């Protein structure tokens, strides 16, 4: 269940394009897809615990297949968390600023 780069026909002659495609099926991808479908079928039929367990197994298979992608995401996650924290800090300071201005306006009108 990997990301497939499609060859650009402008860069490859017709015979080279056929050589670039894989001939064997992606058995792990097929297993993951089937497991996700089975989990969805179980969830739709009302068997929530079994559906969640099967879906969790499919997710584990996906994680095994996409280890490089998970490593890249894991290494970039702190940057996104820092950005989110900075955004929340800015929102908090804006709200505090609005609250002080509101209090000043109330004090002006209550004189």
Image (cartoon, rainbow, N blue to C red):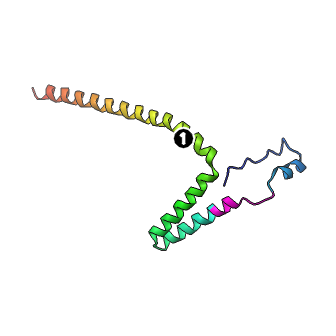
Residue 84: x percent and y percent?
43, 36
Residue closest to the eye, 28 or 13: 28
Residue closest to the eye, 66 or 101: 66
Q: Is residue 106 left or right of residue 96?
A: left
Snapshot quadrant of residue 104: top left
The residue that disc 1 covers is 74
Q: Secondary structure at mark 1?
A: helix
Q: Is residue 97 left or right of residue 66?
A: left
**What is the residue that sits farthest to the left in this orientation?**
111
- Classify the position of the N terminus by image quarter: bottom right
Instruction: Give above or below for 41 relative to 56.
Output: below
Instruction: Give above or below for 28 relative to 43.
Output: above
Residue closest to the eye, 104 or 26: 26
- Give the residue drawn at x 52%, y 60%: 56
- Give the residue drawn at x 84%, y 42%: 10
Residue 2: x percent and y percent?
67, 51
Asked if the magenta segment contains residue 24, the reply would be yes
Q: Is residue 59 left or right of residue 96?
A: right
- Give the residue drawn at x 62%, y 47%: 67
Report how many numbered discs are placed on residues in the image: 1
**What is the residue that sits farthest to the bottom in this orientation?**
45
Q: Is residue 29 left or right of residue 56?
A: right
Asked if the magenta segment contains residue 96, the reply would be no
Snapshot quadrant of residue 82: top left
- Classify the position of the C terminus by image quarter: top left
- Give the residue drawn at x 58%, y 45%: 70
* Label 1 neighbour load within 10 Å: few <14, some 14-19, many 20+: few
Give the residues in magenta: 23-31
Residue 49: x percent and y percent?
45, 68
Instruction: Give above or below for 5 relative to 78.
Output: below
């Amino acid at each position: 269940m990997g990301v497939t780069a499609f060859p650009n026909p402008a860069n490859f002659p017709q015979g080279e394009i056929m050589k670039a495609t894989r001939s064997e099926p992606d058995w792990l991808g097929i297993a993951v897809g089937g497991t996700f479908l089975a989990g969805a079928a179980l969830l739709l039929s009302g068997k929530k615990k079994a559906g969640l367990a099967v879906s969790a197994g499919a997710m584990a298979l996906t994680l095994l297949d996409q280890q490089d992608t998970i490593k890249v995401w894991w290494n970039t996650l702190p940057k996104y968390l820092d950005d989110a924290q900075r955004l929340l800090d800015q929102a908090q300071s804006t709200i505090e600023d609005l609250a002080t201005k509101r209090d000043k306006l109330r004090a002006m009108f209550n004189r």
